[in-house]
Image (spheres, rainbow, N blue to C red):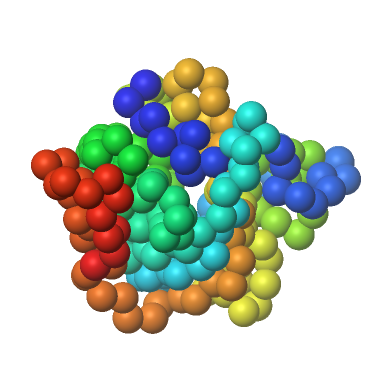
Amino acid sequence: MRFLIAPLLCLATLGAAAAPAAAQIGPAATAQSSSAALAQIESHLRQVKSLQADFTQTADTGAVAKGKMILAKPGKVRFDFGKDSPLLIVSNGSVLSMVDYDVAQVTRWPVKETPLALLLDDKVSLKGRATVLPPSETPEGFIAIEGRDPKHPEYGTITLFFQKTPKGPAGVMLMGWRVLDGQGRTTLVQLANQKLNEQVSDSAFRFKDPRGLRTSRPGRTR
C-alpha cells in the first residue's frame, strides 16, 4: 500500500454514541434515503473550496498528536504539527509530501493515489466511489460515507463523518475522518474550529526541503 501516512494522519469511534437501529423500512425507501444523503454530502464537498481547522489525530497505537490543517481545492492540503515537531505533510495540488526534518527526508505520493483524494477534488462525484454507512455504524446526528477507489483498493479506504447542522453548506459540516490503509492500520482525525471558504495563500502549500541543508531542523514554514 502506497499510502503510508496513516501513522501521521492518525481507532476509535468519532466520540459519539452509535445511533439506534433504524426502524423497519422497505429496501426502496432505504435506497432513496442513502441516495439523498450521498447527494447531500456531494453538494457539501463541492461547495467547500477551502477549509482551515484544528485537528487531533489518534493512531491505532493510541498515540495522539495535534496541529492545524489548511485545505484548498483542488488538491492542496497542509497538516502542520507545530514548530516543535519535525514532521510536516503538504500537498502542492498534485503531490503529497511527508517531510521529516529530523532525518532530512521527503517522501512523496501522487494525491490521487491517497484516500485524501476524495476530500481534495473540487468537482468530486461520489457515484461509484462512496457509500453511505448505515445508522448502526454512524454516530447519532451524523452522516458517514465510506470512500475508496474501486479500481485500486490498495490506495486505502477513508470514512468521512459529517454532522448535521444548518450552519454548514448543504446542511452538514465535516467533523473528521478515519483512514484504513492496505496494511490494516487505522487513523482517526477529528476537526474543530472549522473556517470555510476563506482565502488561503499558496505559500501555505510550500515547504523548505531539508535534503542537502546543514541544519538538522530548518524553518518549516513558508
Q: Is residue 85 left or right of residue 168?
A: left
Above or below 58: residue 47:
below
Q: Position of residue 70 (x, y in %)?
A: 39, 65
Q: Nearer the viewer, residue 120 or 36?
A: 120
In this rendering, does residue 105 appear at all?
Answer: yes
Question: Nearest the camera: 73 or 25?
Answer: 73
Q: Tell me which corner region of the image, top left, top right, bottom left or bottom right, holds residue 221.
A: bottom left
Where on the picture, by quarter, is residue 52? bottom left
On screen, 173 above or below 97?
below
Q: Residue 86's spot in the image, x, y percent? A: 38, 47
Q: Quadrant of residue 78?
A: bottom left
Image point (79%, 39%), residue name: 136
Residue sticking out furthest to the top: 183
Q: Is residue 167 left or right of residue 100?
A: right
Left or right: 19 with respect to 64?
A: right
- The location of residue 94, given as percent across then percent down, is 20, 49
Picture mark count = 0
Q: Quadrant of the C terminus?
A: bottom left
Quarter of the figure that contains the N terminus: top left
Image coords of residue 151 (percent x, y): 33, 25
Question: Which residue is located at x 45 percent, y 21 percent?
Answer: 182
Image vertical order of residue 189 relative to residue 62, above or below: below
Whether residue 131 is visible:
no
Question: 104 and 52: which one is in front?
Answer: 104
Identified at 38% across, 70% down, the residue is 50
Left or right for 110, reference 164: left
